[in-house]
Image (cartoon, grey):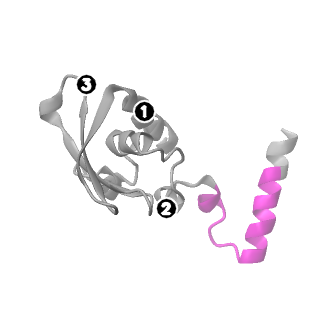
């Protein structure tokens, strides 16, 4: 379910533009809007060196999923993979199924999962 929602946000990035309007060496601000809907723009602040961004919609803070506007700015700034700190543990399939296992058993569990997928 979460992957589908993320995929929807990613696909929507093709309909958005990002225009840098402020910035220094550390943080840049972008005005992000859907094509021909400039009056409904959001502001995305990004620190490319730390690979961190936040949008005025606060979708990540609310739902834990990066919004289309942050993904648009990541594309414009050549951040081409989702930084790991944006992939929350609660969305990882292995985290949900491995809860309660100690470190040794968790490693064995993950290895078994990989082997099962390899042989499928």
* Closer to viewer: mark 3 or mark 1: 3
Lower position in the chain sequence, tag 2 or tag 1: 1
Around disc 1, counting alpha carbons within 10 Å, would you say few (fewer than 14), some (14 to 19), or many (20 or more)?
Answer: few
Residue that extends furthest to the front in the rendered view of this protein: 25
Using the numbered discs, state the Cα–Cα distance from disc 2 to disc 3 in whole angstroms.
29 Å
Q: Is mark 2 on a helix, strand or loop?
A: helix
Q: In the image, is 94 to the left or to the right of 64?
A: right
The percent position of residue 118, horizontal first and vertical second, equals 84, 43
Around disc 3, counting alpha carbons within 10 Å, would you say few (fewer than 14), some (14 to 19), or many (20 or more)?
Answer: few
Residue that extends furthest to the right in the rendered view of this protein: 119
Vertical placement of residue 12 versus 68, above or below: above
Residue at coordinates 43% horizontally, 38% vertically from top-left? 5
Q: Is mark 3 on a helix, strand or loop?
A: loop
User: Residue 49: which quarter of the image?
Assistant: bottom left
The percent position of residue 72, horizontal first and vertical second, equals 37, 39
- The residue beneath circle 2 is 85
Lower position in the chain sequence, tag 3 or tag 1: 1
> Residue 54 versus residue 23: which sits nearer the camera?
23
Vertical placement of residue 14 versus 4, above or below: above
Q: Is residue 96 magenta?
A: yes
Using the numbered discs, state the Cα–Cα distance from disc 2 to disc 1 in whole angstroms.
20 Å
- The residue beneath circle 1 is 8
Give the residues in magenta: 94-114
Q: In the image, is 10 to the left or to the right of 113?
A: left
- The residue beneath circle 3 is 35
The percent position of residue 79, horizontal first and vertical second, equals 48, 47
Q: Is mark 1 on a helix, strand or loop?
A: helix
């Amino acid at each position: 379910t979460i992957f589908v929602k993320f995929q929807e946000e990613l696909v929507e990035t093709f309909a958005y533009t990002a225009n840098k309007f402020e910035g220094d060496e550390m943080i840049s601000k972008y005005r992000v809007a859907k094509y021909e809907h400039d009056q409904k723009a959001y502001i995305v602040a990004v620190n490319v060196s730390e690979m961190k961004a936040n949008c005025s919609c606060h979708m990540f803070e609310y739902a834990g999923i990066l919004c289309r506007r942050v993904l648009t700015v990541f594309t414009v700034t050549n951040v081409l993979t989702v930084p790991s700190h944006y992939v929350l543990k609660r969305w990882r399939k292995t985290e949900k199924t491995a809860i309660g296992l100690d470190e040794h058993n968790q490693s064995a569990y993950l290895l078994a999962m990989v082997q099962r997928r390899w042989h499928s």
